[in-house]
Image (cartoon, rainbow, N blue to C red):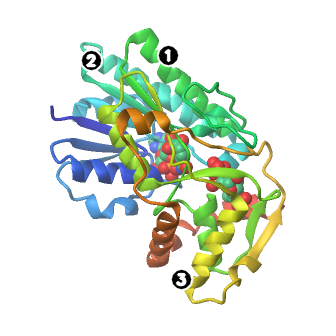
Amino acid sequence: MSKKILITGGAGFIGSHVVRLFVTKYPEYNIINLDALTYAGNLENLKDIEDNSNYFFERINILDAEAINNVFEKHGITDVIHLAAESHVDRSILSPLDFVYTNIIGTVNLLNTAKAKWAANFSNHIFYHVSTDEVYGALGDTGFFTETTSYHPNSPYSASKASSDHFVRAYAETYHLQTKISNCSNNYGPNHFPEKLIPLFINNIINKKPLPVYGDGKYTRDWLFVKDHAIAIDTVFHKGEVNETYNIGGFNEWKNIDLIKLLCTLMDEKLGRQAGESEQLITYVKDRPGHDRRYAIDATKINTKLGWKPSVTFEQGLSLTIDWYLQNTEWLQHVTSGAYQNYYNEMYSNR
Ligand code: NAD
Ligand code: TYD
């Protein structure tokens, strides 16, 4: 069947990789990218596919229920892959309500429209909600998040994502909407907005600016290359069981400080700087409040049931990522001007 898939947040980091994958891999589908173009949304991310005949863009805020309704009608939407969100933990600490509006109310707006439009035959339609491992809270030194780990969100960001996951489940139970949810670990790769650890530090290393390490630097994250996440989303969308959750990750845990040192080494080599030069930029700063100690995904279910595994190692992915940023300095300049400067000053001046 020829699908007409609404991908929300398609101008953002992960969304743009998902849009590109679907537009190029499935020419028989129409892909409708719905995005409000907040500070994190950037159509430059999709320049290479914007003229494809199966690609459409709608600049809409998911808080606008009427506009969502119109897009469903205009394009005859058959399925939704929902990525639009406020996504940065530090921003959620500064202004939690933005996260409540977009991540919770925006998600419920989309669910309501899907419910209303698909009521005649729910079995032909999928509402796929893309979520995060942060809903599970923090791990100690051992153990992994599985699909049955109970939710324990610690930041306004993760609390809002947890809430949206619950609404998606509730719409499946209550109204028989066919849903899928995936909870993925930290992503990295091209087009990542430079407020998150890896792109921020790449940008600061390029510009020889301090590298602000929160707390003792021994916080642990489980990193996945963004293109592998996009492939996992394709896999879950097409092969995953209806009303199931899949955890997505690459069994790739790094303590922040070890990752940062690897990044410094690789960047010194690529920039032709002296070994050890970028490490001098490391600066320990005040910790993030409520900072989750460790995340680690048990991806056994998606590995064994759907046959998905990451295609690149961390060293390969990180090298590709650095190369992309070094080759796309214009992209970096565009997104780090204006409003970004204000955010950066507010975030880091008192640390
Ligand atoms: P991002 O911040 O880079 O992009 C978010 C996109 O959503 C932007 O294009 C933005 O313009 C759009 N958007 C924001 N508010 C909107 C609104 N009210 N209406 C319409 N569009 C709006 O985020 P990302 O890192 O690409 O994350 C995408 C999704 O994946 C999010 O749901 C996030 O929770 C989830 N996720 C992210 C990670 C990660 O490491 N980045 C890991 C797991 C899950
Ligand atoms: P981040 O990329 O914000 O992702 P998340 O908080 O969603 O996991 O941060 C990744 C890790 O890096 C996290 O432990 C916080 C830490 N961090 C710093 O030490 N310094 C920074 O400037 C930033 C942005 C993050």
Q: Does residue 350 appear left or right of residue 242 in this picture?
A: right
Q: CB of mark 2 within 8 Å of CB of mark 3? A: no
Q: x, y percentage for residue 292?
A: 73, 43
Q: Are marks 1 and 2 in contact (CB under 8 Å)?
A: no
Q: Nearer the viewer, mark 1 or mark 3?
A: 3
Left or right: residue 11 compared with residue 286: left
Q: Quadrant of residue 118?
A: top left
For marks 1 and 3 on the same chain, the one whose residue lies earlier in the sequence:
1
Q: Are marks 1 and 3 in contact (CB under 8 Å)?
A: no
Q: Distance between the residues labelled 1 and 2?
A: 17 Å
Q: Is residue 187 above or below residue 204?
A: above
Q: In which quarter of the image is residue 135?
A: top right
Q: Can residue 312 be seen in this view?
A: yes
For the N terminus, the quadrant is: top left
Q: Residues within 10 Å of mark 3 (few under 14, many from 20)?
A: few
User: Residue 87 location, x and y as percent?
Assistant: 57, 46
Q: What element carries label 2?
A: helix
Quarter of the C terminus within the rendering: bottom right
On residue 123, which mark appears? 2
Mark 3: which amino acid? Answer: Lys
**Residue 320, percent across and down?**
45, 69
Judged by depth in the image, the label closer to the viewer, 2 or 3, is 3
Q: Is mark 2 within 8 Å of ligand 1?
A: no
Q: Mark 3 points at which residue?
A: 270
- Of label 1 and label 2, which has the lower sequence position? 2
- Separation of marks 1 and 3 at Cα, in angstroms: 49 Å
Residue located farthest toward the top when viewing the structure as drawn: 174
Q: Name the residue under label 1.
A: 170
Crowding at dot 1, Cα within 10 Å, few <14 / some 14-19 / many 20+, comes out as some
Instruction: Please give the name of the residue rendered at 23% of the width and 34% of the height, measured from the top-left corner.
Output: 74
Above/below status of 111 relative to 11: above
